[in-house]
Amino acid sequence: MRIFENRNMVFVTKHSKESVVSPIMEKETGCNVIVESRFDTDKLGTFSRECDRTESQLNTARIKINEGMKLQGIDIGIASEGSFGSHPFVPIPWNTEIVLLFDKKENLEIYGIYEGPQTNYNHMLTSSYEDVLEFAKKIGFPEHYLILRPDNEYSSEIIKEIHNYEKLFDAFKRCAELSKTGVVFIETDMRAYANPTRMRNIGRATQDLVSKLLSLCPECGAPGFIVKDIVRGLPCEDCNHPSKMPLKYKSDCYKCGHSEENLYPKGQFASPMYCDICNP
Ligand SMILES: [Zn+2]
Ligand SMILES: [Zn+2]
């Protein structure tokens, strides 16, 4: 018997994410994923800036799940939410995908995550169709769709669903005609169905969610027995002063309260490079 055997689980999405998420969830947990596409998730924010996301990534996923549970009258749901930007320290594109699960009956919230540089997230301003073709090639067009606008990234004229060279040429011509400055803004489409690379990352986040769920409490067998707290202070190998490296991980069960500590998860001593005394 799997952890959610035969339970109906609502999944709010309007960009076909179910094609990657549902098979993993159903196979690994035994649930039946019910896709709910009536809620307009674009109201919570779009990657192409027609509507800015005002909530955090996690809160946006929570809102989607709540709306889905209301629409379907179901007490468990999942939602996926992505973000794109630069790596915090290095100027490379960076994708963070979360897949959140909320089981209202059990009051269990848990998420899976993918974070990494595997994305084609990119944009360009140009007046040359040669440049557009080069950009298209680099980002994996036509499997990965493109979005075009005249002038700049905020123009209200926007052309989407560009997934073949005929459409690309027409869109470029139209935007060049409309442009006041003579340039066209071109960008990668980050919606899941328009971006197979992102879709794969959503799959990875779903796998992470499943592996966390399938970590069961050794006492009562409840799902989601994962590290909840990291206690820092691993002693420095040179001066023995407590460093910022983890000393122990703490896991606890949401259901029976059983907890476990895992001492020295990264070794018995910290390198002096993590020590405030040796490497201030
Ligand atoms: Zn337990
Ligand atoms: Zn030290």
Image (spheres, rainbow, N blue to C red):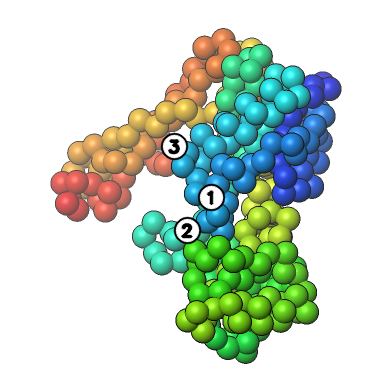
Of tags 1 and 3, which is closer to the observer?
A: 1
Residue identifier under label 3: 265
Residue receiving disc 1: 51
Badge 2 density bin: few <14, some 14–19, many ≥20, Cα 10 Å? some
Kindly report which numbered mark, 2 or 1, lies closer to the viewer in this rendering. 1
* Residue 54 coordinates in the image, percent (x, y): 46, 42
Q: Is residue 124 left or right of residue 165?
A: left
Q: Residues within 10 Å of mark 1 (few under 14, many from 20)?
A: few
Q: Say the numbered circle drawn on residue 37.
A: none
The structure residue drawn at horizontal position 73% and vertical position 26%, both measured from the top left corner, is: 71
Q: Earlier in the sequence, mark 3 or mark 2?
A: 2
Q: Amino acid at mark 3?
A: Pro
Count of residue discs: 3
Tell me the quarter of the picture where residue 27 sits.
Answer: top right
Residue at x 51% of width, y 41% of height = 57
- Whichever of callouts 1 and 3 sits on the residue coming sooner in the sequence is 1
- Residue matched to label 2: 85
Please tell me which residue lies in front, 54 or 134: 54
Depth check, front residue: 79 or 275 = 79
Callout 2 secondary element:
strand
Asked whether, in this view, residue 73 is left or right of residue 226, the answer is right
Q: Return the x and y of residue 259 as percentages of the image width and height.
A: 49, 17
Question: CA gap, disc 3 to disc 2?
Answer: 31 Å
